[in-house]
Image: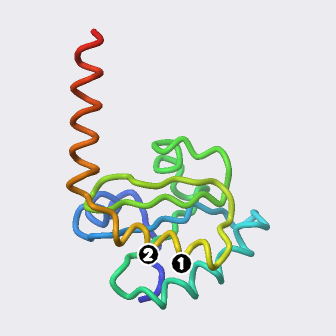
Amino acid sequence: MATLDITEPIFAETIENNGLVLLDFWAEWCGPCRAYAPVYERVSEEFPDVVFGKIDTEDQQGLAGMFGIRSIPTTIAFKEGIGVFMQPGALPEDALRDLIAKLQELDMDEVRAEMEAREAEEGNED
């Protein structure tokens, strides 16, 4: 599956309706972004069950602001609608493949349990 251009109107639907979503925040003027693009595209073709989205930070400033993007490229991953990874900088091809493999194995029941425990802890601090 080729990469999708993600815009604000389809952002929530894309995150909510797909198991694993990777997002690449980029801009046309960004040299490292242009170098990362073919790597991201190649890896996207190896994982047809994963949604690979690209968000142009110039065009989609609201989304970039929502995530506090200060450096591009930045890769963000969502699994089952939950943000599970965020890293600025271009990822080497092997690292991107490894990341996807780890995300596919990630036990979301454990993640949700950790989140609930953290929320309960924070609630007790008040």
Q: Relative to 65, does residue 52 appear above or below in the rendering?
A: below
Q: Which mark is residue 36?
A: none
Residue 40 as seen in the image, left or right of residue 30:
left
Circles 1 and 2 in contact, beta carbons < 8 Å: yes
Of residues 99 and 10, the one nearer the viewer is: 99
Q: Amino acid at mark 1?
A: Arg
Residue ID for mark 1 = 97
Of residues 101 and 48, the one nearer the viewer is: 101
x and y percentages locating residue 103 in the rendered image = 40, 67
Find the residue positioned furthest to the right: 31
Q: Amino acid at mark 2?
A: Ala
User: Alpha carbon of mark 1 to alpha carbon of mark 2: how far?
Assistant: 6 Å
Q: Relative to 19, does residue 119 appear above or below in the rendering?
A: above
Q: The C terminus lies in which quarter of the figure?
A: top left
SS for dot 2: helix
Q: How many marks?
A: 2
x and y percentages locating residue 79 in the rendered image = 32, 62
Q: Residue at x 62, y 78 (%)?
A: 94
x and y percentages locating residue 110 in the rendered image = 25, 52
Residue 1 as seen in the image, left or right of residue 71:
left
SS for dot 1: helix
> In which quadrant of the rendered view does residue 6 lie?
bottom left
Q: Residue at x 64, y 79 (%)?
A: 93
Q: Residue at x 46, y 73 (%)?
A: 100
x and y percentages locating residue 84 in the rendered image = 40, 54
Residue ID for mark 2 = 101
Q: Residue at x 53, y 74 (%)?
A: 98
Q: The N terminus lies in which quarter of the figure?
A: bottom left
Q: Residues within 10 Å of mark 1 (few under 14, many from 20)?
A: some
> In which quadrant of the rendered view does residue 42 lie?
bottom right
